[in-house]
Image: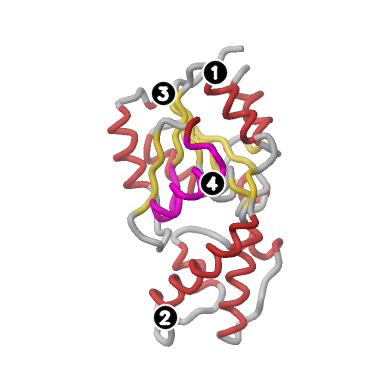
């Protein structure tokens, strides 16, 4: 089975790691502490977006009254503990092993802080299946466009042979900024309706992505 791409760039949170529940759990604690309405999974998928600071404002946080750094650090401290319960989405390891055997290079590009990202990838034993891992140098999850451009330049690969796989509209924005193809997977951080609005292919799971790129 031939794969049409030479490099596949995967988003991490929501796409490979099934951790939306940990984000909702941590955010609801912050919302309760600040007297703001809590949210369920449906609401989360409707409102989550990048930059994350804008998402906080959409939930009702007023940065003239609260300190962004304090909120971000508090969220991460709760999230890191809760995400210990998170697992990879079904089919991730098998898909990675198949693609790896097909001589296609795989990379992870994430808005997560680099050290935390490295630790999670090692915990889930994907480090031996990816050629590179790129995260941010901070916890603020603003955008991964700049680090994505640097990553693509360092790889020296033909953009026409690269594919981005993500679970948010921002992944499409990143792919367009990098000049590469993009497909999306539901079940992560944003609803299928929001993902479909981008016009990009949207799949139910990672195994469907493999079928698509192998045609």
Compared with 178, 140 (above or below) is below
What residue is disc 1 on? 101
Q: Tag 1 or tag 4, which sits nearer the N-term? A: 1
Instruction: Locate the C terminus and report the quarter of the image it occupies.
Output: top right
| Mark 3, secondary structure of its residue | helix
Instruction: Locate the N terminus and report the quarter of the image it occupies.
Output: top right
Relative depth, front residue between 122 and 102: 122
Q: How many marks?
A: 4
Q: Tag 4 or tag 2, which sits nearer the N-term? A: 2
Q: Which mark is residue 63?
A: 2
Identify the residue at image location x=68%, y=30%.
208
Q: Tag 2 or tag 1, which sits nearer the N-term? A: 2
Identify the residue at image location x=58%, y=25%.
97
Q: Which residues are magenta?
A: 109-127
> Residue 201 at what x, y percent from top left?
61, 35
Compared with 183, 85 (above or below) is below
Compared with 142, 166 (above or below) is above
Q: Is residue 205 magenta?
A: no
| Mark 4, secondary structure of its residue | helix
């Amino acid at each position: 089975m031939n794969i049409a791409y030479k490099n596949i760039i995967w988003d991490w949170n929501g796409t490979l790691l099934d951790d939306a529940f940990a984000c909702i759990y941590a955010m609801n604690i912050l919302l309760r502490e600040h007297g703001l309405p809590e949210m369920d999974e449906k609401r989360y998928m409707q409102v989550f977006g990048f930059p994350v600071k804008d998402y906080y404002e959409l939930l009702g946080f007023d940065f003239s009254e609260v300190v962004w750094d304090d909120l971000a650090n508090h969220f991460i401290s709760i999230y890191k503990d809760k995400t210990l319960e998170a697992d990879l989405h079904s089919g991730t390891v098998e898909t990675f092993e198949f693609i790896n055997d097909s001589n296609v290079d795989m990379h992870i590009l994430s808005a997560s802080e680099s050290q935390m990202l490295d630790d999670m990838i090692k915990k889930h034993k994907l480090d031996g299946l990816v050629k590179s891992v790129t995260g941010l140098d901070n916890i603020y999850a603003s955008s991964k466009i700049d680090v994505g451009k640097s990553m693509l330049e360092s790889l020296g690969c033909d953009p026409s042979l690269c594919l981005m796989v993500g679970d948010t509209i921002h992944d499409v924005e990143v792919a367009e900024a990098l000049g590469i193809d993009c497909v999306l997977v539901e079940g992560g951080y944003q609803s299928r309706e929001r993902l479909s609005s981008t016009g990009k292919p949207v799949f139910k799971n990672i195994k469907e992505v493999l079928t698509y790129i192998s045609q």
